[in-house]
C-alpha cells in the first residue's frame, strides 16, 4: 500500500491575512521535529508565545489556531523555530 501523496508545500502558512486576530497556522515539515511558535513585533521584540514543544511529523500538516486579538493593530511576524534549528516566519497584518 503506497503512502498518500502530500499536497502543498513545506513551510508555514498563516491565514486569513490580514486578520482580525483569529489566525490559523498550517505547518508542514519534511522531517519529524519539535517547534516553538512565537509572535514578534515589527521592531523584533517577542510579544506573544503561541505554543511550545509542538510535535511536527514528516509530510503531515499541523494545524494551530492563534488568538492575536489582544495585540494592537499592526504588522507582526509569526515564527516557528524547530529544535533542529529551522526557522520559518510569516508576516501577518492585524486589523481591527
Image (cartoon, rainbow, N blue to C red):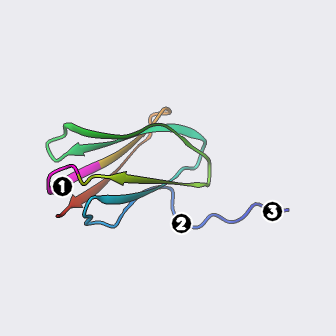
State the quadrant of the C terminus. Answer: bottom left
Is 66 part of what is drawn in magenta? no
- The residue at the point 60 percent across, 41 percent down is 32
Identify the mark at residue 2; answer none if there is no mark.
3
Classify mark 2: residues with Cα within 10 Å, few (<14), some (14-19) or many (20+): few
Side of 20 relative to 60 (left or right): left
- Secondary structure at badge 1 equals strand
Measuring from the top left, give residue 78's x and y in whole percent.
Answer: 32, 49
Side of 22 relative to 7 (left or right): left
Measuring from the top left, give residue 59's x and y in whole percent.
Answer: 62, 54
Classify mark 1: residues with Cα within 10 Å, few (<14), some (14-19) or many (20+): some
Give the distance between the C-alpha atoms of the residues marked 2 and 1, in whole angstroms: 26 Å
Q: Earlier in the sequence, mark 1 or mark 3?
A: 3
Measuring from the top left, give residue 46's x and y in whole percent.
Answer: 23, 37
**Which of the 4 image quarters holds residue 51?**
top left
State the quadrant of the N terminus. Answer: bottom right
- The residue at the point 58 percent across, 49 percent down is 30
Of badges 2 and 1, nearer the viewer stands 1
**Which of the 4 image quarters holds residue 52?**
top left
* Tag 3–tag 2 contact (CB < 8 Å): no
| Magenta extent | 70-77
Considering depth in this image, is 66 or 27 the residue closer to the camera? Answer: 66
Check disc 1 and report the residue beneath it: 75
Check disc 2 and report the residue beneath it: 8
Amino acid at each position: 500500500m503506497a503512502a498518500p501523496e502530500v499536497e502543498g508545500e513545506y513551510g508555514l502558512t498563516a491565514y486569513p491575512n490580514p486578520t482580525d486576530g483569529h489566525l490559523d497556522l498550517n505547518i508542514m515539515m519534511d522531517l519529524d521535529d519539535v517547534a516553538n511558535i512565537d509572535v514578534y513585533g515589527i521592531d523584533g521584540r517577542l510579544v506573544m508565545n503561541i505554543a511550545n514543544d509542538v510535535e511536527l511529523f514528516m509530510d503531515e500538516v499541523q494545524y494551530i489556531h492563534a488568538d492575536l486579538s489582544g495585540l494592537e493593530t499592526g504588522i507582526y511576524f509569526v515564527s516557528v523555530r524547530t529544535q533542529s534549528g529551522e526557522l520559518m516566519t510569516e508576516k501577518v497584518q492585524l486589523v481591527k
